[in-house]
Amino acid sequence: MTQASVKSALGEVVAPGAESRRRAWGLTSLLVLIYVVNYADKAVLGIIAQPLMDELGLASSQIGLVGSLFFLTFTVGGFFAGALHRWMSLRWALVALVLVWSVAVLPMVVVASFAVLLGSRLLLGLAEGPSSALLHTAAYSWHPPAERGLPGALLAGAASISKIAVAPLLAYVTVTLGWRAALVTLAVSGVVWCVVWLAVWKQGPYLAPAAKSDGDAAEDGGEPAVPWSTIFTSRTFVTGALLVMSVYALVAVVLTWLPSYFEVGLGYSRLQAGSMFAFPSIAGLVLMLLSSTIGDRLIVRGATSRSVRIVVPATGVLLCGAILFALPSIGSPAVAVAVVSIGYGFAASVFPLLNAAISEICPPRQTAGTLGVFLAVMAVGGLIAPYGTGMIVDAAGSPAAGYASAFQILGLVAAVCAVAALVFANPERDKARVRGAIGND
């Protein structure tokens, strides 16, 4: 096949540096949009938890168990991100996953029971597991490594955007139309996104030098692969995974329990609690965008990746731990809301900065697989935390005391993991180690 016919079959192949930045950010925005829906699917359990408990007669520990088991299949699904990227193009892999999300939330609309709720969330977790790595891979394909902090922050900030913009809407729909209407709204949103995605998506030039027949996925050319063990045993990967896992435990509890904490623990109304879901996310989004934007500029100007993408977020997690440690001693509901919000905000910057750091240490063709395992390990934090929180609340003298103790424990664990990352993680060192493994093959 001639070079001209190859280009005809593949579509336009854009060289790194020659891509349209407007197009790059437009497609990044589309990826952020579906990540917003992704997090709304996670957050909806927290929003409808109290109505579900009232209608089905469930205990707090049962809702917590559902939240934790979601993260079990979410973790398992994450390990398939690399395989999906090899078997299917990014275009069709993401369409398939999003359609499964949309279907997964609907069984509860037809038959409401604990068993159906559990099965629905297990399927949702399995389909959402690979999506984070694939969405990051798709976004990184349009941005060079030194400038991935901001797009990563926008993707990580989708959780905050979801809770700021979508959670209050879902809370309103739940209060006015019922919790089933909230689930239908999410299903329709996923289908609409798939239509737009199929119409506009093209892969960018920063993962591989060429693309396959749909102009979407990378060929096998380019930098050779290294043994996966070399990447996964690096100190940056190991301590970075422990750090994001501990912070994700906090995120999982916020997604599952925060509206209930505000309602039954602090005495706010159901609509107020659903709307206040946004407060921690506002703090998190602001700090994520600031740290990532400034961090990208500093790296372009010569700052080390360790100082920007390890030291800064780990320090933020240490501050989070110190703030949450004080929560059980606070008697004012408004101050308690502020403490949880600020603590969450300081910890949130860990996600985009650590994802960018991990993407540095692996060859471009192994980005999806590396991030898939990294994010799957991260999700382990969600396996225990929601269920553990439910058990703590059930055993506590009051819901307020139970939730405060759970947040305190989460803050302490995260602080310990932050210290480990500060001591051992170094992307520049481990990038050189990985590149050395290529040369030794």
Image: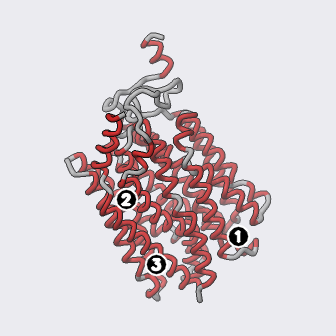
Question: Of callouts 3 and 1, which one flags the residue occurring earlier in the amino acid sequence?
Answer: 1
At mark 3, the secondary structure is helix
> Which label sits on residue 52?
1
Q: Disc 3 and disc 1: Cα gap in Å?
A: 27 Å
Query: x, y percentage for residue 133?
Result: 49, 47
Q: Is residue 47 left or right of residue 286?
A: right
Q: Disc 1 and disc 2: Cα gap in Å?
A: 33 Å
Image quarter hosting the C terminus: top left
Inspect the image, locate mark 2, and give the three-letter code of the amino acid beneath it: Met
> Which label sits on residue 408?
3
Of marks 3 and 1, the one in the foreground = 3
| Callouts 1 and 2 close, C-beta under 8 Å | no
Which one is nearer the viewer's eye here, 196 or 313? 313
Query: x, y percentage for residue 398?
Result: 59, 87
How busy is the neighbourhood of tag 1: few (under 14 within 10 Å), some, or many (20 plus)?
Answer: many
Of marks 3 and 2, the one in the foreground = 3
How busy is the neighbourhood of tag 3: few (under 14 within 10 Å), some, or many (20 plus)?
Answer: many
Which one is nearer the viewer's eye here, 285 or 208? 208
> Which label sits on residue 41?
none
How busy is the neighbourhood of tag 2: few (under 14 within 10 Å), some, or many (20 plus)?
Answer: many
Which one is nearer the viewer's eye here, 390 or 72? 72
Query: x, y percentage for residue 400?
Result: 55, 84
Query: x, y percentage for residue 141?
Result: 41, 37
Identified at 70% across, 61% down, the residue is 118
Q: Is residue 300 left or right of residue 81?
A: left
* Residue position marked by numbered label 2 in the rendering: 288
Whether residue 220 appears in this view of the structure is yes
Question: Of callouts 1 and 2, which one flags the residue occurring earlier in the amino acid sequence?
Answer: 1
Inspect the image, locate mark 1, and give the three-letter code of the amino acid beneath it: Leu
